Amino acid sequence: MTAGGPYVYGIVKAGHPLPADLRGVGTPAAALELLSVGATAAVVSAAPARLRARRRDLLAHQEVLLALALDGPVLPMRFGMLAPDAETVHEQLKAGRKRYPRVLERLADRVEMNVKALSATGALAALVADEPHIRQLREAAQRRPGYEANVRLGEAVVHTLARRAADAAQQVVPELLALAVARSPGPQAAGTVLNMSFLVDRQDTAAFQQTVHRLSAEYQDRVELRVAGPLPCYSFTELEPEPSGRAVAVARTGS
């Protein structure tokens, strides 16, 4: 370890295998090791002398987590998690000795899929056909062209596109939930009307992606859906049961 303490990737069950060729952040890429306490262990490496959010290191961090998840559940840490020293990591594992195994069991054989919904592009024809007030404003702007008429039309188009996209996004969520174990709303992202992560059984990943693409085509005049994943389960570090028996995420997100 460096004097700055270990770099922490995530928490796994004690004895979790570490692929011999798997390397972490830094140049040269750092070797991984386990710091174990009881039933759980932290996957760590030596911290680079100067850690920055470079593309290579961001990808290395995520690739480590995805590779580890192939051999068992992983409670992922976000990029840049540095501990002061190994003892601090041991203390954290001790403090979570009851919670960590429970969360790891819930994440076993599951991945995170993130879905973002944006206003449909190139949908003006459908907008004019479906929305009388847009049609009226467009006709008025054509009859009497001018700055104010164009501004009114432009603002109405932007607002209506966003409303139609938001309505469509809410309609597709139930179908996606049918393929998921849990959901976690993400932070507001510029240009999006929906940013939501879903916890999905690994075996259902392809079906989930296909469903997103089908729904995006079905609602193409209203919304554009973008799916990212499979990702480490950043948004589902804690789960609580709903009254229905399904689970909901209560952890912070950052997708």
Image (spheres, rainbow, N blue to C red):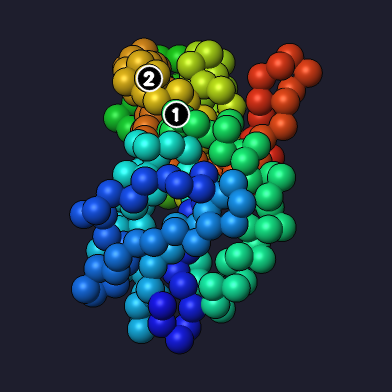
> How packed is label 1: few (under 14 Cα within 10 Å), some, or many (20 or more)?
some
Name which residue lies at 24% across and 53% down.
20
Q: Is residue 36 above or below residue 177?
A: below
Upstream in sequence: badge 2 or badge 1 = 1
Front position in the image: 108 or 149: 108
Front position in the image: 136 or 245: 245
Where residue 232 appears, x then y in whole percent?
43, 43
Where residue 221 appears, x then y in whole percent?
37, 20
Q: Amino acid at mark 2?
A: Gln
Where residue 54 appears, x then y in whole percent?
30, 69
In the displayed structure image, the side of residue 225 where residue 173 appears, left or right: right
Position of the N terminus by quadrant: bottom left
Quadrant hosting residue 26: bottom left
Front position in the image: 133 or 218: 218
Does the residue at mark 2 contact the one at mark 1 (Cβ under 8 Å)?
A: yes
Q: Amino acid at mark 1?
A: Asp
> How packed is label 2: few (under 14 Cα within 10 Å), some, or many (20 or more)?
few
Numbered label attached to residue 73: none
Can residue 164 be seen here? The reply is no
Q: For numbered disc 1, what is the local secondary structure?
A: loop
Name which residue lies at 71% across and 16% down.
245
The residue tagged 1 is 109
Q: Mark 2 or mark 1: which is in front?
A: 1
The residue tagged 2 is 203
Can residue 32 be seen here? The reply is yes
Front position in the image: 199 or 76: 76
Between the C-alphas of marks 2 and 1, the distance is 8 Å
Q: For numbered disc 2, what is the local secondary structure?
A: helix
Name which residue lies at 44% across and 28% down.
109
Where residue 214 appears, x then y in whole percent?
33, 15
